[in-house]
Amino acid sequence: MILQTEDVTKTFGGLVALSDVTFQVEEGEILGIIGPNGAGKTTLFNAISGVFKIDKGRVKFKGKDITSLPPNARARLGIARTHQIVKPLNDLTVVENVMVGACFGKGNASLPEARKKAQEVLEFVGLAEKGEILAGKLNVPEKKRLEMARALASDPDVILLDEVLAGLNPMELSSMLEVVKAIKEKGITILMIEHLMHAIMNVSDRVMALVYGRKISEGTPEEVANDPQVVEAYLGDPDLALKLLKDKRRSG
Amino acid sequence: MGKGKTLFWLIPVLLIIVLIPPVTGSVTTREGVFLILMYVTLAVSLNIILGYTGYVSFGHIVFYGIGGYVAFYLMKFHGIHLIPAMILGGVGAAMAAFALGEAVLRLRGAFFAIATIGVNEAVKALVNNLNFIGGAEGLFFNFRIYKAYGGAARAIWFSYYTMAALTIITVIAAYLIKKSKFGLGLMAIREDEDAAIILGVNAKRYKSLAYAASAFFPGMVGAVFFFKAGNIEPHDAFHLIKSIEMIFMVMLGGYGNVTGAVTGALVYERLKGFLLVNPLFKNLHMAISGVILLLIVLFTPQGIIGFIREKSKKLREILE
């Protein structure tokens, strides 16, 4: 078990964003996290990466309690993430952006090492020829790839992908899914938030559903898609769930 | 990132400027160049926190004052030579900045800028009321102090060469910081502090260290300046206008860029000289500087060097 949370609770004023969320992630798997808007998915990522203090509960990474560590220390330990709303370092070049990940993440690379690593990773995510462009000048799908490249350059054990597929056209989507699968093949554990049901059911080993900050279901994609609670709370339409399942069988 | 190409021409250019007064033997030129060197050092070091890290230290002159006072006190009452006193002045300023940074650097944007003005004014008020360092009247040197340097005239030349060495060292140090892993972390903080932290940059520590580095050199400048002046008083040491001038120089030349800060300082010194001697503008030089600053921020926020860098790829490597 590489990552686990115990009773993680976070409130913003009167709003309970996360309520007693307990889950575990096994090394090397892809855990998909689904849930309607405002379900607390990104809040959960923030809790894991340490963006804010949680009100209750614990986060453990490789058996070590990291609940009180600041985000930069967690990054150093090997937890990398991407942002749903991309955060490029606009006035630095694409290569420099990725070098920041390599230098300050788990890899702790020197500048020359980081430059090499950055080239490698940019090649991997398909941004190699954009290396010397300022990051602010990339388009949105490219910025998503950059987010991914920065996270990967840090040599993480766990990577949190926050809606990296949203807003991509079908071509971009399938190439991004290839990248996700390739990350898994490197042995990196992936947690991914996604709204695109087809995609996440397809690529995940397990899926967890959040609604109003609570975990309502967890299991294989089939189990979660068939869970009446999920169908009702999230998908709304039982027929759609069945259709998704068929798609999954066909492609799997 | 090139391999120090910028320094290969920038340092020789500065050395040529430094050599003009001793070659011509002109005291007037020496005073002018001393001022240029001082501006260059102040601008280049402010750039570390302002340009690299993205924090507008509005009251940065406070470190020049602190360094000046520490060194002046040591020289006057303990007979310490200028060089060690200057280094201790710099260390004092850097330590003050580090401690302040731990508190004030939690603030972002305008709040930080305002807080630094407050710090400058608070230190000025404090020094005004501390009698052992002369209070509001300040401290004066006894002329005998200059004897150790071979008389007052030689002491002034000595302070000139010290300032020149300090300028060269500051420019090299600022460049090396920019090109280091530390510098990359600072620029990541400037671009997006939250993203930088998530990527593993220890932003709190880095900001404090950057603040200390950008205070160290002004502290030493203060030491040399007040040694040469022979007296120090709170009004001169913590003069807010000088702070604004420093920001102006960095913005004019191009923030985040060593060549930019140097250029800004050179241009500002010429501009100020021109405006001050011109009967039409002599009382308006800050107002005109303000208008220019406004135009820069509105139309070329990247400054003179930033503008050239954007237009020419070839020049980019030698203008860092």
Image (cartoon, coloured by chain):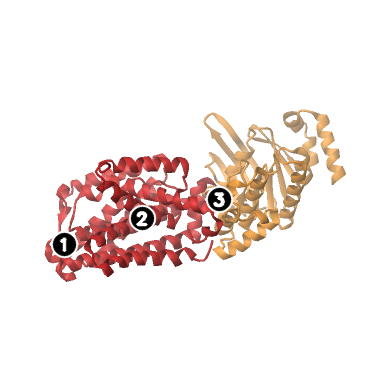
Q: Is residue A217 left or right of residue B123?
A: right
- Give the class, few, some or many, for how many residues have Cα within 10 Å of label 2's Cα (few <14, many ≥20): some
Chain of the residue under label 3: A
Residue A27 in view: no
Q: Which mark is residue A74?
A: none
Residue B316 rendering spot, x and y as whole percentages: 52, 58
Q: Is residue B227 left or right of residue B317?
A: left
Instruction: From the image, state the color of chain B.
Output: red
Q: Amino acid at mark 1?
A: Phe
- Name which residue lies at 21% across and 49% down: B234
Residue B212 in view: yes
B228 above or below A200?
A: below
The residue beneath circle 1 is: B77
The residue beneath circle 2 is: B266
How much space separates mark 2 and mark 3, taking CA atoms?
51 Å
How much space separates mark 1 and mark 3, taking CA atoms?
52 Å
- Give the class, few, some or many, for how many residues have Cα within 10 Å of label 3's Cα (few <14, many ≥20): some
Which chain is depicted orange? A
Q: Which mark is residue A66?
A: 3
Are the residues under badges 2 and 3 in a single subunit?
Answer: no
